[in-house]
Amino acid sequence: MVFSFVLLAALVLGLIVIPQDTKAQYGGYISSIPAATVRQDNPEPIIKSINPSASNVGVGTKTVNIIGEGFIPSSVARVNGSNRPTNFIDSSHLLVQITGNDTYLYQTNGGFYITVFNGPPGGGYSNAVFFKINKTVASPAGTTTNGTQNDNANNTYTNFTDAPENNSSDSIDGSNLSSNAIFGENGIFHSRLIQWIFAAILVLVAVILVRRIYGADKKYHAVPLKHD
């Protein structure tokens, strides 16, 4: 009975005194073996969506919001496998810069794929999400070329282009205006008025001639003839 009690006390004391590190003695030296540590790998990223998911050709730098999970501060977004400047927001959001050169470079393919890469340990590539490129170039007014054509078909525009001056016609019109003012129907010397004046002048000249002839004949008969 006493032996059993002593054995139980020794076991309890041993559990309290023995440290967590395992110790081994080699040639009089005690070596401590640290407890094994668990390595934490980086997660594999997953893309759920991107916003915006499309752009027009020729648009300048655009920021795309990548929404997903498993993102880390060292995550890198890629365009068709090429790294792009990436901003880490949190484990579910990244921001990546898309340039106008990207839209020109990949417009023939209709767009490009966006992926996210996490480095080791662990990590890896995410799934690919397609970013669409619209080949229609936006106009300054924010409408497409087709929309502009429709607007032109429904609207009437006035041409304000100055026509070249015709000095010769102006001079002719001016001379005609002066002629009409003097000899026109409402002018100073209307054609009928000129006829009446001309007729009156003829009558006056005829009267003067008759009077001169009659007066000379009367004067001739009034003077007595001289006889030698």
Image: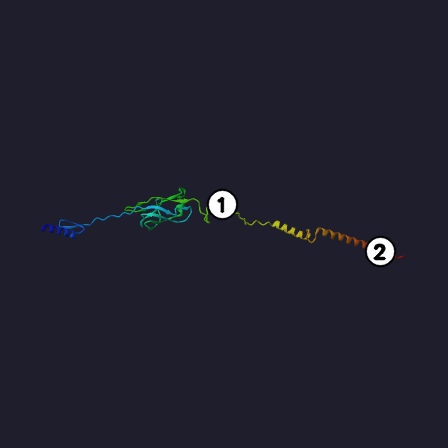
Residue type, numbered disc 1: Asn
The secondary element bearing badge 1 is classed as helix
- Pinpoint residue 41: horizontal percent, then vertical percent: 27, 47
Marking on residue 53:
none
- Pinpoint residue 218: horizontal percent, then vertical percent: 84, 56
In this view, the residue in front, 207 or 95, is: 95
Name the residue furthest top: 109
- Pinpoint residue 93: horizontal percent, then vertical percent: 34, 49
In this view, the residue in front, 194 or 165, is: 194
Could you tell whether 142 is left or right of 47 in the image? right
- Pinpoint residue 191: horizontal percent, then vertical percent: 71, 51
The secondary element bearing badge 2 is classed as helix
Q: Earlier in the sequence, mark 1 or mark 2?
A: 1
Name the residue furthest front: 1
Residue type, numbered disc 2: Lys
Could you tell whether 192 is left or right of 10 in the image? right
Closer to the observer: label 1 or label 2?
1
Name the residue furthest right: 228
Real-space Cα separation, disc 1 to disc 2, in angstroms: 101 Å
Q: Which residue is mark 1?
A: 150
Pointer 2 local density, CA inside 10 Å: few below 14, some 14–19, many at least 20: few
Q: Which residue is mark 2?
A: 218
Q: Are marks 1 and 2 in contact (CB under 8 Å)?
A: no
Quadrant assignment for the C terminus: bottom right
Pointer 1 local density, CA inside 10 Å: few below 14, some 14–19, many at least 20: few
- Identified at 83% across, 54% down, the residue is 214
